[in-house]
Image (spheres, grey):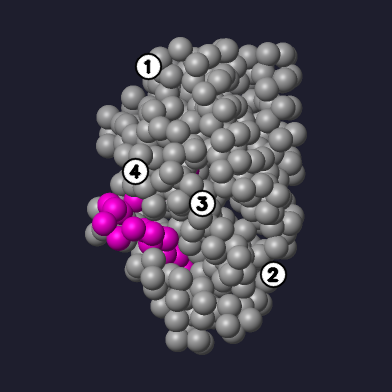
Amino acid sequence: MATKSLKPQTSRTLSRRDFLKTAGAVAGGLSLATAFGLPSMSILADPVMLDLYHDKASWAPNADKVGALAAQDINIGFKSVPFADTTTYQSTVRAALGTNKAPDLFTFWSGYRMEDIAKSGGAEDLSAIWDKYIASGEYSQGIASAYAFDGKVYGVPFNVAYWSVLYNKPLFDENGLKPPTTWAEFMTLCDTLKNKNITPLAQTIDGRWPSFILFEELVVRSTGPEFWNDLMNGKAAYDDPKVIEALGVWKGMIDKGYFTDPGVTMGTATNDIIPTFKQGQLAMIPIGDWYSASLVEAGIKAGEGYDAFIMPNVKDDLPNVLFFETGPMLVSAKGARKDDALKVADWWMSADAQKEWCTLQGFSSPNSKVTLDNPVANGLAKTINDGKYTALQRYWEATPPDIVETAVDELAKFVTNAGSAEDVLKAIQAKATEIWSSRG
């Protein structure tokens, strides 16, 4: 992508005619710098560099590259302030937002996860930016709604990720394996891999949150999107027989040894999963396609070292669904450099900025004007379009956080065989009943 040069123009010899024309222009009100084609002092001034807080340490180098591009393009850039731990990050940001130490820019989670920040006045209203980009046809209202409360939009997309199963392509090719299209094929695939002493699937409870990954996949693929939405909105119960049945499928997979040890790490800061995946000891990782950035950083190329498929439904008669996740970048309402941060937020949504960021990260782009050279993202988009998939917001953001926080701890007990499906689901439902009652 072409970037703007900040180098001053080279000297040139003016003819007498050019000089007289230029002198006339100065007399008419132009500055000497403009009349002679010299760079203005504002262009030569050092760019403002903002702080971007986030909890994705391995993304920091690429985020900083885009921040440097912003400095070239609009003379306002940013540098990462990364946190290695999600829990520490959330508490730090929440504590800072009401003070004069609020970050200029920060990333967060969408849906219910950002509700308290938006409604407490911690984030600036970015509706005007969205109005411009929706009017241009570059973004959909659906993405904006993930950051919207009471008619105002409080974030721009830091990433939009579809959740699929990333698989080791050379491993599949060497063993004559193909991505499954039915649940029966998926189970046969896992059996085949297990018999070859290859761990079929990654699963961990490290960091707490990953325990919901198989929960959401197996529940929605056993019950369908309508039941899932009811569960997320308090209209269905966690201890419903349908959910218990779905966890029975999960338990069967655990008992067959389809998963990694749940103590392994697969985060963006520390990671045990990627080395085993790269070495062919692990075949598949169910995760958002934002994880592609970590694979690429480890030297695993899209379309060559890894590819992706959408997990099949447990019950064949259910409609095609997949989960999506979108994490916003927000501007602190009390940030000392809020005006500059708003300009960065506007620039961030541009096609140039999105192409650079999504190319570096291997992401799908939410900006419709951006085309990417990423076979995995392109293939996944084709599958979604051809299969008329319904996209559902992932569990972490789709229901109130207090329910989710209880759920991930209870589900961790299930994964480690410390609690039965019935006991775990009753505990989650008790918290859900409490929270939904308190919300009225």
Q: Amino acid at mark 2?
A: Pro
Mark found first going from the N terminus, 4 or 3: 4
Rate crowding at label 1 as few (under 14), some (14 to 19) or many (20 or more) other CA atoms within 10 Å: few
Q: CA distance from mark 4 to mark 1?
A: 26 Å
* In this view, the mark in front (2 or 4): 4
Query: In the rendering, at what x and y percent does residue 219 appear?
Result: 44, 48
Mark found first going from the N terminus, 2 or 3: 3
In this picture, residue 420 sits left or right of residue 183 = right
Q: Which residue is mark 4?
A: 225
| Figure quadrant of residue 147 | top left
In this picture, residue 175 sits left or right of residue 411 = left
* In this view, the mark in front (3 or 1): 3
Q: Is residue 88 above or below residue 149?
A: below
Q: CA distance from mark 2 to mark 4?
A: 35 Å
Rate crowding at label 2 as few (under 14), some (14 to 19) or many (20 or more) other CA atoms within 10 Å: few
In this picture, residue 395 sits left or right of residue 320 = right
Q: Which residue is mark 3?
A: 247
Q: State the residue at coordinates (37%, 36%).
A: 229
- Secondary structure of the residue carrying numbered label 1: loop
| 117 inside magenta stretch | no
Q: State the residue at coordinates (66%, 47%).
A: 419
Q: Which residue is mark 2?
A: 275
Q: Which residue is mark 1?
A: 151
Q: CA distance from mark 4 to mark 3?
A: 17 Å
In this view, the residue in front, 117 or 313, is 313
Labelled pair 1, 2 in contact (Cβ < 8 Å): no
What residue range appears in magenta? 307-326
Q: CA distance from mark 2 to mark 3?
A: 29 Å
Tell me the number on the disc at residue 273. Answer: none
